[in-house]
Structure formats: C-alpha cells, structure tokens
Amino acid sequence: MDRARLGDLDAFESIVRSRTDAVYRLSLAITGDEADARDAAQESFVAAWRELPGLRDADRFDAWLQRIVVNRCRMVIRARSRRRVREIPASLLPAPRADVAAASDADRLGAALSRLAPDHRAILALHHLEGRTIDELSASLGIPAGTVKSRLFTARRALDRALGTEAEE
Amino acid sequence: MREPRWDDDRLSEAFRARFLVSAPDDVAPAILKALDAPRRRPLVLAPRRWIGAAAVVAALVLGSLQLLAGGERAPDTTPAPSHTALATDGPDVAFGLPVLSVEEAVRRRDTALDDTVLAVSGYVGPVGGPPVSCQPSAGLTSPVQPRCPDQFEWLMQDPEQLVTRSGDSWTGRQPSGPALNPIVRSPTAWALGREAGLDPLPPARVLVLGHFDDHRAMACPAAERGTCRRQFVVDRLVSSEGAAVTPEPVLDIEDRQVVTDEAVIRVLAESAGRGGRALAVGAIVGTRIGEVEPAAQTESLSRAHVVWIVKRLETWSGRPTTATILIPDGTGEAFLAGADGITALRPAISPEPIASPAFPAEILGLPVISVAEAIGRRETILDDTEIAVRGYFTAPNVGVELPCPATPADISAVQSRCPDPVTWMTDELERLWTRTDAGWESRPPSGPALNPLVRFDVPFEVPNLWNDTGPNPMPAVVLGHFGDRRAAACPEPSVEGCRRAFVVDALVWAAGRSTPLAPVVRTAEATESDDAVERRFRKVTGLVVEPIWLTVVKGSNVREIEPWAAEQAPELTRAGAVWLVRVLVRLDGDRPVVRTGYTIDGGGTLWIGVDAVVAPWGRRL
C-alpha cells in the first residue's frame, strides 16, 4: 500500500487485482446493471489511483475505496438519463405474475432493488452484501453513525415495500 | 400460505445469492489498461505529483544526475548569452504583458526584485531520463521554499540537453546559459504535453507567467527568506511547444464532492475586490489550506470541507501582480490571501459584464440561442417550440424580503407569481441586487432579459451563491418554451401573458458544464425507481425517444401543475405519488416540443396531455 501511495503503479495493480471482484459486485448491487457496474468499477479504480496520495491513513483504504465506489455508482446512475441506448438486463425486468411464487429470493431481491433510490441500494448492499457494521458504514459513507441507522432503516422500509409490491404484481 | 418474513438473514442470503459473483474476466484487464495512461505521463510531470502528495519518492538516483541539482544559476556565474532572442515563435505579448527571455527575467530579479508578474519564454528540461528520487522534505514552513525535485528542473534561455543516455547509464549537467528553477505549486497546473520515457528528449519550448518575491516567502525561516524571495513562482503555463495550454483545475480534495462549479468560482474570483483575470484554479481540503497559504489557516477556512484557490492577474500600484483568492466551497465568500493573513473581499457590484463563459452551441440537438433571440422568436412565432436559451440566471435568495406580492391561491403554473418578477435570465452579466440601509433592493436588467418560470417540478439545481453582497449571476442554458398549452386555463385577462411566459423545462448547463437530467424527487412516498418508471413508459408507449426526464410529486400537487389533469384524471390527485415523464419529441416535421405524461407510482396507466385534454395513452383524443 505504501508503495502504491508513492506512485508505484505496479503495486497499485496488485491492489486492483485483489479487489476487482469486491468492487465489481458492490457496483453491480448498486447500479443493477452489468455494463454500468463495469464502468463504475473502472472509474473507481482510476479515481482511487489519482487520489491515493491524499489518503492519510492507509489502514482505511478499503473504506475509502468503498466510498469512491458508491459515489461513482451514483454518477453512473445519474448519467443514465442522458444515455440514448440503455441495456436492460432481462433479470431486472418485472417478473411475470405467474412466476412470482417460483422466483428465487435472489431474483426478487434484484427486481425490488431496481425500484429503490441509489443511496438506498448502496447502504443495503454495503450492509447485507459486504457485511459492513454501522461503524464501518459510518466510515465508508462519511456520515455519523446515527445517520447510518436512520438511512438503513429508511432503505430497509423502502425495500420491504418494493418486495411486497414485487410479490403482488 | 403466508410467506416467511424477510428478516436480516434471509435478506443477506438473497444478497449473496444475487450479487456474490466474480467480475467478468475482462474487467480487471480493462481497469489496468485505463490505469496505464497515467503511468505513461511525461516524467517531467511526475515530480509535481509527488510534491503535491508531500511524498517521498520512488525510483533510483543516479549519481551523475545529481550534477543537475544545485539551485538556480546565480547571475555572476551565468555566462554571457550569445543572444536574448525569445524561445517562442508566438506573439511577443501574453496576457497583455511583454514576453521576456529567461536572461531578462534573471536580470530583472537581480536588479529590481519585486512581485511583478512576468511573461517569460524559454525551454524546460530535462524531459525524460531516469526518474528523480527525493527524500521527504521535512520542516518546510512555506510552499515557496525550494524542495526536491525543484532543483532538477530548469527553465532555460536556450534548448540545452541536460541529460544524455548511454546504454543503461545517464549523464547530467547544469545549464550553461541563463536558467531558473521554476517553482510550480498548487493551483498552477504543469502539463507540458510531452510523452517521455527513459530516453531524454529535447527541452520543451514554453511560455509561462510567473513572479519573484512571492508573499509566501515571509513564511520561510528568516535565514532562508532571501532565497525564497528569489524563487521564480510559476503562475500559469501559457503555451508548450507553441500550443496554447488550457489548464485543468488542480483538485486535491481527496474523495470529497464540491458544491460549486469551477466556472462559477472563476466568475466569483474575477469579480471580487479589485477584479482581474483568473490564471489558475485549484481546490484543497480546508484543513490543509496551510500547505498552499501558510497565513490562511483561519478557523473559517480550515473548517471548510473544501477551499477553492484562484490565482488572479490584476493591476496593483500600476504593476501586474497576482492575487490569491480563497473561496470556501459553496459559500460565495471570497478572501484575499496575503503574507499577514486573509482579507475578506466583497464581489464587485458592477453592471460591467465579466468575460463571457464558453456557452455550448448546441444541447440535446437544439441550437443554443441568446435571450434576445428567444424574445425575437416570441414576437414572431409564438408557439410551444422547445428552445435552449443561454444567459445569466439570477434569482432572489430565500429569506430576502421580496418586492412582489404573495402568490394568490389557485393560480396557474404558467401565471407569473412572486418571485418570477425578480427572477431573470439576462444576456449580459448584470448585478441586479444591492444592499441599502432599508434592506435589499433589486432593479430590472438594462439589457435583453426574460423572467423564466421555474417551477418545483423541473430539474433546476444551481449552486446558491447568494451572500451578503447579493447573488452572483449564474451562466446557464435552460430548456423551455413559450406558448404553453396550459395558458388556455389562465383567467381571461391573463391568457396572453401566460402564453408569452417562458416556461422552463430543465436546466441543462450551468457554469461551464452540462447538468444531468436527473430525477427530481418531491415526495418520499415513491416506491418505484426512476428506471422502472422509464421502462414502463417505454413499454406502454412503445416510443424510442431521448431524452426522458422524470419528476415524482405528491398526488395532491398535480392540480397546481395541471388543473386539467386533476379534473380529467382525478385518481392522480388521490395517489400518494405521481410521476411526471417529460420527453423531447419532434412534431410537425422537425419541430421540437416537450410533452409531459403522468403516471401513478406503482401504477400502470400513463396519461398524456394534448391541448386541453389529459387522457390515458392510446385513447383516441
């Protein structure tokens, strides 16, 4: 890590290789789109490389990187509205009614997440996918722990509503 | 059978099943390829990055290269140059300043040391060769104290090749002619645009603005102050190899987001105090402001999440000088940095237009026209054609006592209401508000102007730059139209006024950059994502149109947006949340118009408004 902070790109490349999967899956959970997840992952690492010298505490690299990923995902999602052609993965289209009972929890979750705001998706993914605690989320998102709890509660409520809607469709 | 509850365990398991995947094989290579571009940056740039990071450096040091170091060439050891010709084939004036040779700049330093800004033409080298290694610079008190690798880079009178390579070894030397070590610090960008590797290249021909006797020399230890005053501090790289350089802002803000756009910062800095022209713009985390301006570590700046730094060229006591303007992000406050601390500035209240920003010529396929052209169009063809209008946007701030009556109830969305009469798009930059003993007063613009109707259901997010000196007009491009069909629902005496109103559909460009047509969320009741609504719109209509932008409001808001919608589709007003879907389409051949659809959150029907009718999509009107 120290070598990477000093501008050693080879050292940073090894960091990239060890974290590509984690960054990609977090991006996928937030954006819900494979192409967007690729873009967000790539932009996150490029931003991290550029900003790495400013990272004061190397021990906080992963939390810092997650924060970059969340921000990049937000930007990618915002940019969607300007895109002329959108790829919509079939997995995110609402499931036909007859399939609801048979749909797996994973599919239902994917469809329900697509109804949520990006910030809700991000905090839920960090908590339930990455297993981040309240304190860790506070560090990752740069917000007080109390705010994390509040946001997590709100996001969870929105997800419950979306899951309910999903099942009723 | 009742479905099991979605508790944390079930949710986490579903997350893992859905998203615990490996990245596709081509993701990591694509990332590494993207990272490879910075790796190939010119080696002469690399030390600047290391300085910015206050870092120790990597790589090897070759003993022979140390010959390069040794500080600036003193004039008494500088051989007489064979000529003093400029190293540029370009104009002999830059930013209104006569272009000097390096020798002339050195002479100026040695005969009349002051902080006059000089335009200097010369050659920068070495370019390429082995990376320079530096030890951490400890105990520095001023940004203008020379530090490694400053002493390895030269601004020279002549294109001297300072490093040569023979196999795996390099030989370096100092310049034989007049030369300076250029000091480049934030916010000045230093991009020579040369691809360089281990093989040394010829020096880069440059034109720079810079000065000696920087005010930050006073922060150097007393014993070094004389040396600090003699440093040539670069304010701007004007050109490299004859090509003009447009500097990128130097952002050292870690992972923080800025509120105010760079272009706005330029306008603010150029108008504050004595005024002048921005040469370089950067930003740094507030707690680190002392790294750039040692005397600026005040509470108000240190606690700012980001502070913008602008180097401005101005005239002071009849001399061209640079001022450093510090602007806490998102505040509109401006401070002048000096050796003794900071001085609060107030942006000038002046009707004189400031340098016009580079408005785009076209946005979303629409030509961008001026306010005067928009008015001309209204006076000749009053229809609802969508137009993109550029100008300066000025709006009163919340909390200011408005010089217009309160909005009556049940007024149409396209009827003028307070603060519309004091909200302006103007062709020229005009400051319309002044503070008097009685409070704030506004005046109408003197040039072409419109009162845009900006309602709460359109994307229109501008930085709030109102401060105690009034609002700073925002260079902006907005999408909008005259002849709104809802004008027909205005009270009879107001119908014509409603038709002539300029109704804004979106802010699409502000202060130097495009603004996304991001969803506008005006209620927490919505459960659908904007993506889901957009998919539903496309599925229902079968339309393949771009752009689409969305707003979600409370159902109870629908009546004030469109009374016809409330009357003809009352279920909209009873819904918790209603989405407005706006699309830019082409009618009558190629006439662009914006059409608005309404759909209940989580519902399936899409209502479209045409003339005075609001009906479900597909119903024959």
Image (cartoon, grey):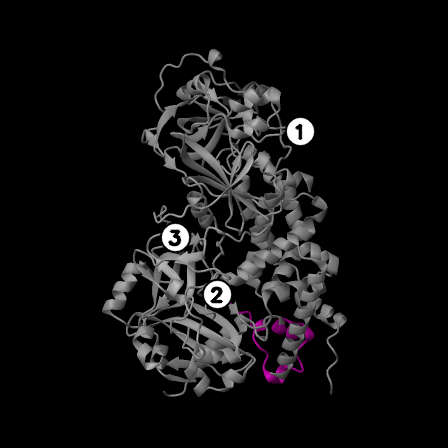
Residue displayed at 67% across by 73% down: A157
Q: Give the range drawn in magenta.
A: A86-112
- Percent of width and height locating residue B101: 38, 23
Of tags 3 and 1, which is closer to the observer? 3
- Percent of width and height locating residue B212: 48, 25
Report the quarter where the N terminus of chain B lies: bottom right
Nearest to N terminus: mark 3 or mark 1: 1
Please state which of residues B608 and B294 is positioned toward the viewer in this rendering. B294
- Percent of width and height locating residue B93: 33, 31
Q: Residue B138 carries which label?
A: 1
The amino acid marked with disc number 1 is Ala
Q: Inspect the magenta stretch and tell me whether residue A107 lies in it.
A: yes
In the image, taking residue B282 as reference, residue B352 lies left or right, namely left
Residue with the mark numbered 3: B431
Q: Inspect the magenta stretch and tell me whether residue B178 lies in it.
A: no
Q: In which quarter of the image is residue B524?
A: bottom right
